[in-house]
Amino acid sequence: MPLAEFNKGVLKHDWEDPRIADFADNIDFVNGVAQRADGFIWMLDEEGMEAAQLEKEGVLGGNPRTASTLSVWRDLAALEHFVWNTVHKRFYDRRAEWYDPTDELRMVLWWVPDGHLPSVTEAMERFAHLEQNGDSDFAFGWQFAKAQARNAKRN
């Protein structure tokens, strides 16, 4: 079953700020690597994500420093490979340079039916559920997903 992924954060500085430039200038490159990765299914395009991020009354709150991604992957292994074994990891390792430090949740995962492309509203519902209730079949983080994958292999 395909896996949806949504992550969000708030940048320390405006998108045009030179301190964010290395991040901002490489988003298309990193997203291109994702889109060519084995197991990639879909990603909300830049225009759609930007519109959702900037919508004043929207589920993301209209903060112009929001940076988020919504994507669907064939399975957990495909997403993990992209996150930890491609150029994405170099940027992930530098996240403290660009994002406000926070103890808040930044990512949610959930299983979706074949062919389903989630909306940002759906993603934020899952995000809020995980934040309020912890891991469940409805919304979960990496460790829960890994445990599910291990259990599936045993059965």
Image (spheres, rainbow, N blue to C red):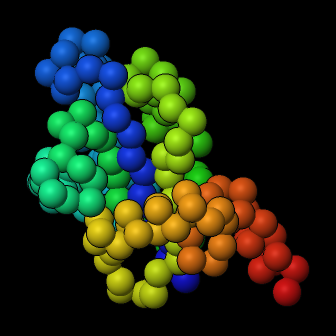
Coordinates of residue 135 in the picture (x, y in percent): 66, 65
Residue at left offset 59%, top offset 53%: 80
Total count of labels: 0
Residue at left offset 85%, top offset 86%: 155
Q: Nearer the viewer, residue 138 or 59?
A: 59
Answer with the quarter of the image where residue 42 lies.
bottom left
Seen as rendered, the residue at the extreme right is 154
Residue 70 higher or lower than 65, as above or below: below
Residue at left offset 50%, top offset 52%: 107
Q: Nearer the viewer, residue 100 or 21?
A: 100
- Position of 25 with respect to 123 (left or right) is left
Is any atom of residue 7 visible in this view? Answer: yes
Coordinates of residue 45 in the picture (x, y in percent): 20, 58
- Position of 94 with respect to 59 (left or right) is right
- Position of 78 with respect to 114 (left or right) is right
Coordinates of residue 86 in the picture (x, y in percent): 50, 40
Answer with the quarter of the image where residue 43 lies.
bottom left
Is any atom of residue 85 visible in this view? Answer: no
Residue 112 higher or lower than 129, as above or below: below
Residue at left offset 52%, top offset 67%: 129
Seen as rendered, the residue at the extreme top is 18
Coordinates of residue 47 in the picture (x, y in percent): 12, 54
The quarter of the rendered structure image containing the N terminus is bottom right
Residue 29 higher or lower than 105, as above or below: above
